[in-house]
Image: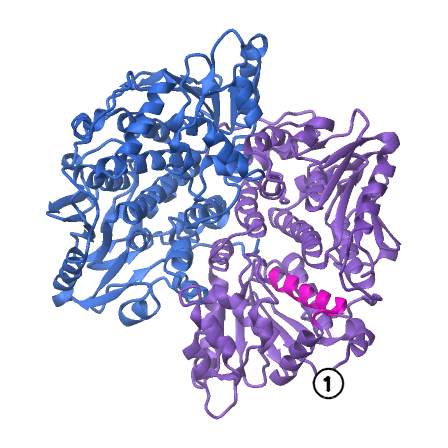
Chain colours: A blue, B purple
Amino acid sequence: MINFQTSPEQYHHWKLKIEGAVATLSMDVQEDETLNEGYKLKLNSYDLGVDIELADAIQRIRFEHPEVRVVVITSLKPRIFCAGANIYMLGTSSHAFKVNFCKFTNETRCAIEDDSAHSGRRYIAALNGTASGGGYELAIACDEIYLVDDGNSAVSLPEVPLLGVLPGTGGLTRLVDKRKIRKDRADVFSTLAEGLKGKRAKDWGLIDDTFPTSKFQESVNGRVDEILSSPNDRATGVGIKLNPIEVEVSDQALEYKYATLTFHREQRYADLTIRGPESRPEMSIEEIEQAGDSFWPLQVYRELDHALLHLRVNESEIGLVCLRTEGEASNVIAVDENLVTHKDHWLVREIILYMGRVLRRLDLTAKSFFSIIEPGSCFAGNLLELVLASDRSYMLNDPDQEVEIKTSEFNAGALPMSNGLTRLQSRFLAEPEKTEEVLARTEPFDTEAADEAGLITFAPDDLDWADEIRLAIEERTSLSPDALTGMEASLRFAGPETMDTKIYGRLTAWQNWIFQRPNAVGEHGALTNYGKPTKAQFDYKRT
Amino acid sequence: MINFQTSPEQYHHWKLKIEGAVATLSMDVQEDETLNEGYKLKLNSYDLGVDIELADAIQRIRFEHPEVRVVVITSLKPRIFCAGANIYMLGTSSHAFKVNFCKFTNETRCAIEDDSAHSGRRYIAALNGTASGGGYELAIACDEIYLVDDGNSAVSLPEVPLLGVLPGTGGLTRLVDKRKIRKDRADVFSTLAEGLKGKRAKDWGLIDDTFPTSKFQESVNGRVDEILSSPNDRATGVGIKLNPIEVEVSDQALEYKYATLTFHREQRYADLTIRGPESRPEMSIEEIEQAGDSFWPLQVYRELDHALLHLRVNESEIGLVCLRTEGEASNVIAVDENLVTHKDHWLVREIILYMGRVLRRLDLTAKSFFSIIEPGSCFAGNLLELVLASDRSYMLNDPDQEVEIKTSEFNAGALPMSNGLTRLQSRFLAEPEKTEEVLARTEPFDTEAADEAGLITFAPDDLDWADEIRLAIEERTSLSPDALTGMEASLRFAGPETMDTKIYGRLTAWQNWIFQRPNAVGEHGALTNYGKPTKAQFDYKRT
């Protein structure tokens, strides 16, 4: 079982140093501290374990060190920044693992950009040595890239020429869409195993500047000082501690304080039940800070995040997740209102941004999601997003029992999808005015009103309810898991595309295709033969 | 060798009837007239041969029958409109063929939408029987869909439940992006093998209306009359004849009047040389009409189109195409100016729109393209788009020889990419002002000016030229063809995405992934076992 929890004192591969407003995140990968057997993490190459630590560090900077304004990402190894994802790890991994590994590393890089865009922290990649493949992809997720000019160090994306796969952790997309490098130069760069250094790398826009070895540290520090002395109106304060997420693991379930994940392995589905807040105190900002990571929205979304990652990597045969909620809708709405009141406070801002990231993680999870809306549920406000994110929703229509859903201000823009739309906007592309109508309604929607408003998929009555849900589950889990993954990835992202959706859509889908091609992973494939005395032999048919 | 040329008198599967302003395109697939052996085209199912005829018919309506304002697509078979792509054909095809088959059918459907959007013809899908899979995908490429209400006929996308693949000919994308159907309803519909009929299909937006059998023809006719009696300011006239493209085929080359495609099979590349117009007469619209399909821009783009299709399907081991031109740049520019002068005339409008479609076909071709710019070339105006579409360009830098490229108004918007940008805009995303600067320059760019302006990739001098080109070709054709396909599909489409690019990017890439999965094409896969007594057995791991 892969464990997604860690903390700086447990890191094997990164050192996190906080000095005032500057965090330095230094990569120093321990060759033998691998997540699986059969490979060594040489030259600061990484596996999922290394990236789990990086994701944790970025999350902790945001919550535990809000005073940080600049994050410098560098390496403690001489002459090498990072050699990218470990090839032997990729070569020995299953297809499903490779795909999920890439998805998680992509989410980590998007989290860096989310921090930069919404929390105003500036990320500097201080490349004290060569950054190749995933190493350079990490660099281009940062705002600024500085490369040492030692006559040797380069940036490169050698995946195509050396491995027969893509720079799929956002690499190709960020070249042309973020750094807006001309496609012909991007083409040359991406087929050049040795990459580019110095002046040419700068002229082509691959790096922001290059400094000689003797002046490298000083120049990076100078740039950090420049940023620190620039005007700044970011709200900040004293961080809160992110304690380990408490979870009781058994064979049948993961039990968290506000969430329960129950496996029905024979039927290949799971129930994921989220519990609403127990009460609805109007908390002051001091009380929120004091509650820290036990504040309901932060705790429940950390638990949901953990459950999603667990499902992806440790429960690959579970194809369907039934989302359920328990609690008082009014308590959920009260939390949303409480958050809105304090939305300019740094901690509340970080909590809201994190809720958005977790919901986007759900949008990008290759499992089917059905929301099951029953009496006693609390799909309101931020939890209504679970219904809107689901592939389908079923709401009991029983006049004898109260079943309701409700919107809050949180459905109006605080928790955007990767494509920049709210889930309501995405739902009502055909009738954009419905988004406003639904948001304007102050009372809850009972089943008929919800159906009428187009908020749910089906509203079976109590006689049909149990059978309909059972049949829907059976039917869904009987379908081809691959066809469902492709279908859901297409239907969930109606409307515009952004750099993020291009990474998870266009780039990832092509990479996953290549990850199955004999030219990459077959006996004579480039990935299989990397580092061996044998050479790749291609079937040169173009597809 | 697959032949992409046909004409109505040769059609096996379609009847094209022109009555005044109405074209009726009726599908009547002949079971045994297949492109390959091993399957029968039952129930109006189709293979590439059927779609080549459809593409031809749409092209001929535009050029030969400009008076047509409404195109009705229907079936001559009772109770069935079209059963979609033939499953046994798919099941017995190679991966590369499946991918290229889908690409071509996608382009045909996009050509319908291009005609509707830019030439104002209205396409009506008159579903006199069930439209399933690719049959319904053809319907949603039309503007309006009417389904007979005979108690039996339905629309459906049964690919996911029956075949374990996607409705990949635009189906999923058009559901949510064109018809803007709610994603949960799209999810239900796309997992329902039997599809939906009548009122529910209409309520969900899958069709525009449904009429009982006895009133079906009358109601469709009524709608046609309504359109014909609506105001109309489209320019029209008397059509021109599209004669067969003359091409001399040998083992080493395809020789057209204005194009030569030469194969270097050992080295896995081809030279595609385009010849500019012989002179620059300023032609009146009558002269253009009289020239018809021998008018240079129409003839040369038909030849280029044919060469691209040939390369895709008949020359799969050719991985790289070197684009070359021969002629007077000023003649090309004169043609562009001539076209601009008459751009409101229907024929000129159709020629320009067609040039755009051919260039988009090039953008979507899974081959590498290098432009080779030498003395005697004429990469100007519309032919400059070849340079801009290429993955790289090489321009000789020799002060003793004149080598020039030049822009025209045609580089400013007449020939957009699928993403809605011009190729110049796409090139200069980082410096949008450069697009204007380049277009504003009235004199040609010599090599140094072109390099300075960022219009070319490399400018080797005459000493290095031959070696550099040779090495670039050798290096390119040594790389993994699959990695190149994914890389080029990512780098060529910087910037925004549209419905079209989502179909060729997100949807197609996922479909291609699924087309390789054992759950679809393995021994126990759904596609393999369709129609057999054996049942598909899935590996239920989610990826």
Q: Please tell me which residue lies in front, B436 or A28.
A: B436
Q: Main secondary structure of the magenta part?
A: helix
Residue A449: horizontal and vertical position, in percent?
Answer: 54, 21
Picture quadrant of residue A316: top left
Kind of residue at badge 1: Pro
Q: Residue at x 50, y 27 (%)?
A: B540
Q: Residue at x 37, y 37 (%)?
A: A414
Total marks placed: 1
Picture quadrant of residue A125: bottom left
Q: Is residue A92 visible?
A: no
Where, quadrant-wise, is the N terminus of chain B in this rendering? bottom right
The residue positioned farthest toward the left in the image shown: A19
Q: Is residue B331 above or below residue B481?
A: below
Q: Secondary structure at mark 1?
A: loop
Residue A501: horizontal and vertical position, in percent?
Answer: 44, 46
Q: Please tell me which residue lies in front, B27 or A313.
A: B27
Which chain does tag 1 point to?
Answer: B
Relative horizontal placement of residue B432, taking residue B250 as reference (left or right): left
The residue positioned farthest toward the bottom in the image shown: B400
Relative horizontal placement of residue B539, taking residue A45 as reference (left or right): right
Residue A97: horizontal and vertical position, in percent?
Answer: 39, 36
Q: Please tell me which residue lies in front, A272 or A387.
A: A387
Residues drawn in magenta:
B343-360
The residue to which callout 1 is attached is: B281
Residue B47: horizontal and vertical position, in percent?
Answer: 73, 46
Q: Is residue B357 shown in magenta?
A: yes
Q: Is residue B82 above or below residue B423?
A: above
Q: Is residue A345 above or below residue A3?
A: below
